[in-house]
Image (cartoon, helix red, strand yellow):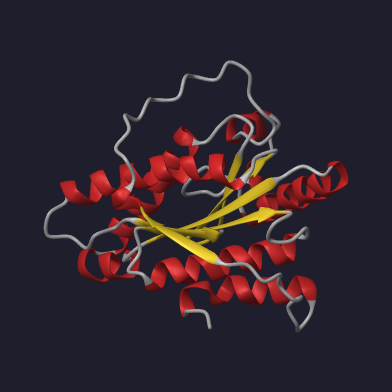
C-alpha cells in the first residue's frame, strides 16, 4: 500500500497506536498538479519582530537546540509530534479546523545516486528554507524523516492551507528548471484536515500519508487532498 520511502513513518505510527491502524473515514481524494496552478508572484516574508514559540530562533534563545533538526533548523520529529498533538487536541476541544500537510522531495534518491549525498543535503536544506520563508507565523514546520516534512496549520481549513504548498511548489519548480541535466526535484504533498479527515493525530497522519503516496504515484509535483 505504501512505498518504502514512507515505511519508517508507518512503523512510527504503529509504535504509537499499536499494531492496527484506526479505521479511516471514507473520503474522496482530489489532486492538483502544481504546474497547473495560476502563476502568482512570490512575495518574501517580512522579518518577524516577535518570535513565536514554534520558531527555531525562539527555541535557540531558550537553549533548547535538542528540539531542532540539525540540517534544516526546523523542528525535529519529537518536537513536531508534541506540537501536533497539542494543536489537534485544542482543535477538537474548541471545534476548530487544523490542517496537516506532509511534503516529500521528488526524485531525491535519484539525485543522490547521480550527484552524490551533498546534492541531496543541498535539496533538503533548500526545501527547509522555503518552508520557513513561506509559512505563516501561526504555522509550524518540522522534519519527520529524511525526506518527509510536515506543516501544521492551526485554525486553518484545507483550502487556505493549500495556498502555502502551492507557493513552495512553484519555487521548487523554478529551481528544478534552473538545473538542466539533473533529476526534476519537485515536491509531492498529502493533506489532511480535521474534522473532515478525522479528529485524532494518528488518523490525520495516516490520511495525509495516503494522499502523499497518491501524489507520488502521479509522478510527483502534485497535491492530494480530500474533496
Q: Is residue 20 above or below residue 92?
A: below
Q: Nearer the viewer, residue 80 or 24?
A: 24
Instruction: Name the quadrant containing residue 50.
Output: top right
Q: Residue furthest left?
A: 181
User: Residue 165, image x and y in percent?
Assistant: 45, 46
**Extreme residue in the right direction:** 93
Residue 183 place in picture, x, y as percent: 22, 63
State the quadrant of the C terminus.
bottom right
Q: Is residue 144 above or below residue 53?
A: below
**Residue 94 position in % (x across, y down):** 85, 41
The residue nearer to you, when weighing 127 against 27, is: 27
Position above or below: 142 against 31: above
60 or 92: nearer the viewer = 92
- Residue lying at 87% horizontally and 46% vertically, measured from the top left: 93
* Residue 121 vertical placement versus 212 (above, below): above
Is 47 on the left or on the right of 86, as rendered? left
Q: Position of residue 75 (x, y in %)?
A: 60, 46
Q: Can you tell which quarter of the image residue 210 is in?
A: bottom right
Give the residue displayed 55% in from the left and 44% down from the top.
159
Look at 71% across and 70% down and name the residue there.
Answer: 25
- How many circles with numbers are drawn on the protein? 0
Q: Residue furthest top?
A: 49
Amino acid at each position: 500500500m505504501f512505498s518504502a520511502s514512507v515505511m519508517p513513518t508507518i512503523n512510527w505510527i504503529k509504535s504509537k497506536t499499536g499494531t492496527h491502524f484506526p479505521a479511516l473515514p471514507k473520503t474522496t481524494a482530489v489532486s492538483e498538479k502544481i504546474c497547473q496552478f495560476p502563476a502568482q508572484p512570490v512575495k518574501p516574508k517580512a522579518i518577524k519582530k516577535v518570535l513565536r514559540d514554534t520558531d527555531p530562533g525562539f527555541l535557540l534563545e531558550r537553549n533548547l537546540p535538542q528540539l531542532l533538526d540539525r540540517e534544516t533548523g526546523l523542528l525535529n520529529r519529537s518536537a513536531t509530534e508534541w506540537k501536533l498533538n497539542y494543536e489537534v487536541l485544542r482543535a477538537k476541544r474548541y471545534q476548530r479546523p487544523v490542517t496537516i500537510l506532509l511534503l516529500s522531495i521528488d526524485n531525491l534518491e535519484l539525485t543522490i545516486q547521480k550527484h552524490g549525498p551533498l546534492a541531496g543535503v543541498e535539496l533538503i536544506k533548500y526545501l527547509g528554507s522555503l518552508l520557513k520563508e513561506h509559512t505563516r507565523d501561526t504555522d509550524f514546520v518540522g522534519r519527520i524523516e529524511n525526506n518527509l516534512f510536515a506543516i501544521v496549520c492551526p485554525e486553518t481549513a484545507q483550502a487556505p492551507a493549500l495556498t502555502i504548498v502551492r507557493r513552495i511548489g512553484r519555487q521548487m519548480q523554478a529551481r528544478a528548471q534552473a538545473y538542466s541535466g539533473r533529476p526534476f526535484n519537485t515536491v509531492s504533498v498529502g493533506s489532511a484536515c480535521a474534522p473532515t479527515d478525522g479528529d485524532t493525530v494518528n488518523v490525520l497522519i495516516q490520511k495525509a500519508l495516503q494522499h502523499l503516496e497518491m501524489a507520488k504515484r502521479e509522478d510527483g509535483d502534485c497535491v492530494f487532498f480530500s474533496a
